[in-house]
Image: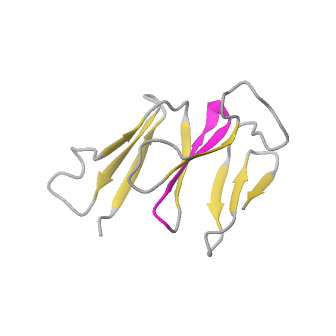
Amino acid sequence: NDTLLYASSLITNHISAFNLSNPSTFLSTSIRNYTDLNYPRKTFVDCQGGLWVADTFSNRMLHYAAGSTSPDIVLGRPDARSFSDDSFSGLAGVTMDKACSVLYVSDGFRVLRFR
């Protein structure tokens, strides 16, 4: 099993995944790049190895299945134009329960629960 380190860049608006299991290249070679983000401030890896990204200035949470660089779940404002009760206004934190069945997302004003 590979051990991955996810590093977000708020300047270039992307996230890189580095393989820590290969110490000769882990700092110099990104094995995966996640792009089309707008201030990816928070990340969280779930029990299945999926990556959750708080795309802060787009007011949405993105989920990438393990090994994928395309989101399979979008929570919040998927098109950056719509708004509803489960939309976000900035993103302050993300976590999941131990069973990996409930996702908690804070936008600084409230905590929303997604099953």
What range of the chain is rendered magenta? 48-62
Residue 12 horizontal side relative to residue 57, left or right: left
Residue 30 sits inside the magenta stretch: no
Where does the image place residue 44, in percent across and percent down from the top left? 53, 56
Q: Nearer the viewer, residue 9 or 66?
A: 66
Q: Quadrant of the C terminus?
A: bottom right
Where does the image place residue 49, in percent across and percent down from the top left? 45, 62
Identify the coloring: secondary structure
Q: Quadrant of the N terminus?
A: bottom left
Residue 79 horizontal side relative to residue 83, left or right: left
Give the residue at the far top of this rendering: 81
Looking at the rendering, which quadrant does residue 107 occupy?
top right
Q: How many marks?
A: 0
Where does the image place residue 113, in percent across and percent down from the top left? 76, 58
Residue 44 horizontal side relative to residue 28, left or right: right
Instruction: Please report the residue visible at 63 percent of the width from the left and 64 percent of the height from the top.
Output: 96
Give the residue at the far right of this rendering: 85
Instruction: Please report the residue visible at 22 percent of the width from the left and 44 percent of the height from the top.
Output: 29
Give the residue at the far bottom of this rendering: 99
Instruction: Please report the residue visible at 44 percent of the width from the left and 33 percent of the height from the top.
Output: 35
Give the residue at the far left of this rendering: 24
Looking at the rendering, which quadrant does residue 23 occupy?
bottom left
Where does the image place residue 83, in percent across and percent down from the top left? 80, 32
